[in-house]
Amino acid sequence: EVQLLESGGGLVQPGGSLRLSCAASTFTFSSYAMSWVRQAPGKGLEWVSAISGSGGSTYYADSVKGRFTISRDNSKNTLYLQMSSLRAEDTAIYYCANTPIPYFAYYFDYWGQGTLVTVSS
Amino acid sequence: QSALTQPASVSGSPGQSITISCTGTSSDVGGYNYVSWYQQHPGKAPKLMIYDVSNRPSGVSDRFSGSKSGNTASLTISGLQAEDEADYYCSSYTSSSTEVFGTGTKVTVL
């Protein structure tokens, strides 16, 4: 069964940085586009970023462009999200999700359990 | 990119059918056959229910079906069951090469 395990969440001050990781297993990682989706407490889902299977193409929501960087290490089957200049409105559960298409995440097939990021002083 | 518009809540009795709408624009829902639907129970991760407008992943009940007309996509749940009570979100690819989710719909089984 597909497994996606996020880590790296926690409490960070406004303006600070954090790196999230998503360890994947039981599927051919490099053949899948990967995404980050977040959900603020009590709110709906918000797409954050996506990356192609090769890592050569990246995509971002306007709300995080210039502050977040998505990357992947296909040799380690791991997806990353480097977050900087964090704001209170970035507080959310961050989910990673996979898509069985290598070039773009047109939908989100399997999801991890999420990791909570809290931005507060 | 503005969120797609969904009704805040929909309810139905067991055995009934309900339909959730998801309205966007020609730059997202209306422009591509890349609409998907997700079910989320409280405290759980979302689960894919429909992709590419009307395709069901393996393991998803055939009581769930999807369709699209113009800028509005729809998810229909037939033979409503207690376990279907959850939040439902649509999502669409956009002309900006991004994804956008809907506002979410709470389904209540009466």
Image (cartoon, coloured by chain):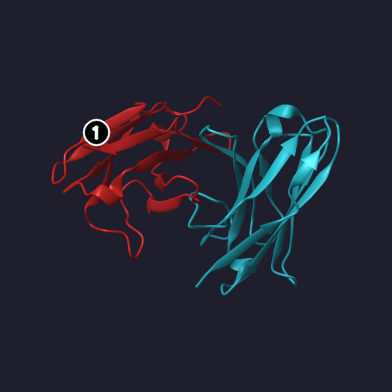
Chain colours: A cyan, B red
- Chain letter of mark 1 equals B
Residue B36 percent coordinates (x, y): 40, 45
| In the depicted structure, whether residue A75 falls above or below residue B39 | below
Image location of residue B5, percent across then percent down: 40, 26
Q: Report the side of A28 relative to A90 (left or right).
A: left
Q: Secondary structure at mark 1?
A: strand
The x and y percentages for residue B4 are 44, 29
At 81% from the left and 45% from the top, the residue drawn is A18
Quadrant in which the C terminus of chain A is drawn: top right
Left or right: B17, with A65 as reference point? left
Q: Which residue sits at x=26%, y=58%?
A: B61
Name the residue: 73% across, 28% down. A88
In the foreground, B29 or B84: B84
- The residue pinned by badge 1 equals B11
Looking at the image, residue A70 sits to the left or right of residue B54; the answer is right
**Amino acid marked by disc 1:** Ser
